Amino acid sequence: MATHNLTRLLGNSLEATAKGIRAETMIFVADADKAVSNDIPLRFAQLKGSRVVRLKSAEGHNAFKLERELISSEALPFLDGVKPNSVFK
Protein backbone atom coordinates (compact mmCIF):
# COMPACT_ATOMS: atom_id res chain seq x y z
CA MET A 1 0.00 0.00 0.00
CA ALA A 2 3.01 2.31 0.29
CA THR A 3 2.77 3.15 -3.39
CA HIS A 4 -0.80 4.37 -2.80
CA ASN A 5 0.39 6.93 -0.25
CA LEU A 6 0.29 10.25 -2.08
CA THR A 7 1.32 12.13 1.06
CA ARG A 8 4.86 10.74 0.72
CA LEU A 9 5.36 13.22 -2.12
CA LEU A 10 4.69 16.19 0.18
CA GLY A 11 6.39 15.33 3.44
CA ASN A 12 3.75 12.83 4.56
CA SER A 13 1.37 15.71 5.23
CA LEU A 14 -2.28 15.08 4.45
CA GLU A 15 -2.95 18.81 4.66
CA ALA A 16 -0.19 19.66 2.16
CA THR A 17 -1.38 16.91 -0.15
CA ALA A 18 -4.97 18.18 -0.08
CA LYS A 19 -3.75 21.68 -0.90
CA GLY A 20 -1.42 20.38 -3.61
CA ILE A 21 -4.12 18.55 -5.56
CA ARG A 22 -5.95 21.07 -7.70
CA ALA A 23 -8.43 18.66 -9.24
CA GLU A 24 -11.96 18.29 -7.99
CA THR A 25 -12.19 15.08 -6.01
CA MET A 26 -14.76 12.47 -5.05
CA ILE A 27 -14.00 9.91 -2.37
CA PHE A 28 -15.61 6.47 -2.16
CA VAL A 29 -15.42 4.60 1.15
CA ALA A 30 -16.89 1.25 2.14
CA ASP A 31 -18.39 1.49 5.61
CA ALA A 32 -17.80 -2.21 6.33
CA ASP A 33 -14.19 -2.22 5.08
CA LYS A 34 -11.93 -4.07 7.51
CA ALA A 35 -8.88 -4.13 5.20
CA VAL A 36 -8.26 -0.38 5.29
CA SER A 37 -9.46 2.36 7.60
CA ASN A 38 -11.73 5.08 6.28
CA ASP A 39 -10.19 7.65 8.63
CA ILE A 40 -7.59 9.01 6.20
CA PRO A 41 -9.84 9.22 3.11
CA LEU A 42 -12.56 10.91 5.17
CA ARG A 43 -10.08 13.37 6.66
CA PHE A 44 -8.72 14.09 3.18
CA ALA A 45 -12.26 14.66 1.92
CA GLN A 46 -12.89 17.09 4.76
CA LEU A 47 -9.69 19.02 4.06
CA LYS A 48 -10.31 19.09 0.31
CA GLY A 49 -14.06 19.63 0.37
CA SER A 50 -14.55 16.42 -1.58
CA ARG A 51 -17.85 14.75 -2.20
CA VAL A 52 -17.96 11.51 -0.17
CA VAL A 53 -19.90 8.47 -1.32
CA ARG A 54 -20.38 5.74 1.25
CA LEU A 55 -20.74 2.18 0.01
CA LYS A 56 -23.09 0.32 2.36
CA SER A 57 -22.43 -3.25 1.22
CA ALA A 58 -21.59 -5.73 3.96
CA GLU A 59 -18.82 -7.03 1.66
CA GLY A 60 -16.36 -4.47 3.03
CA HIS A 61 -13.27 -4.00 0.89
CA ASN A 62 -15.04 -5.68 -2.06
CA ALA A 63 -18.06 -3.35 -1.90
CA PHE A 64 -16.98 -1.63 -5.11
CA LYS A 65 -17.62 -4.88 -6.98
CA LEU A 66 -21.21 -5.06 -5.76
CA GLU A 67 -22.25 -1.43 -5.80
CA ARG A 68 -21.52 -0.63 -9.43
CA GLU A 69 -24.85 1.13 -9.96
CA LEU A 70 -24.28 3.48 -7.03
CA ILE A 71 -20.71 4.16 -8.10
CA SER A 72 -21.77 4.87 -11.68
CA SER A 73 -24.70 7.04 -10.64
CA GLU A 74 -22.36 9.18 -8.53
CA ALA A 75 -19.18 9.14 -10.61
CA LEU A 76 -20.58 9.80 -14.08
CA PRO A 77 -22.33 13.11 -13.24
CA PHE A 78 -19.29 14.14 -11.22
CA LEU A 79 -16.97 13.46 -14.16
CA ASP A 80 -19.34 15.21 -16.56
CA GLY A 81 -19.17 18.31 -14.36
CA VAL A 82 -15.38 18.44 -14.00
CA LYS A 83 -13.91 21.35 -15.87
CA PRO A 84 -10.84 20.30 -17.93
CA ASN A 85 -8.77 23.21 -16.60
CA SER A 86 -9.51 22.31 -12.97
CA VAL A 87 -6.99 19.47 -13.14
CA PHE A 88 -4.04 21.31 -14.63
CA LYS A 89 -3.55 25.02 -14.06
Image (spheres, rainbow, N blue to C red):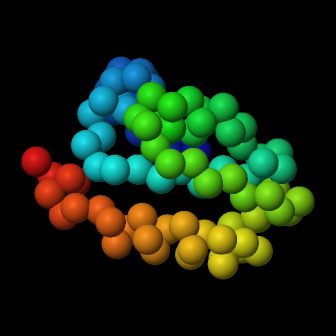
Corner quadrant of residue 17:
top left
Residue at the far left: name it.
89
Residue 34, placed above or below residue 7? below
Residue 28, placed above or below residue 11? below
Residue 3, placed above or below residue 79? above
Corner quadrant of residue 37:
top right
Number of numbered discs overlaid on the protein picture: 0
From the top left corner, tell me how far across and down residue 80 is, in percent: 34, 72
Along the viewing direction, whichever of 83 and 41 lies nearer the viewer: 83
Q: Which residue is drawn at 34% across and 50% down?
A: 24
Along the viewing direction, whichever of 36 and 21 lies nearer the viewer: 21
From the top left corner, tell me how far across and down residue 25 is, in percent: 41, 50
| Relative horizontal placement of residue 4, taking residue 19 as reference (left or right) | right
Q: Which residue is drawn at 27% across and 33% down?
A: 20
Residue at the far right: name it.
58
From the top left corner, tell me how far across and down residue 67 is, in percent: 72, 72
Q: Residue at x 46, y 43 (%)?
A: 50
| Relative horizontal placement of residue 39, taking residue 25 as reference (left or right) | right
Residue 37, placed above or below residue 77? above
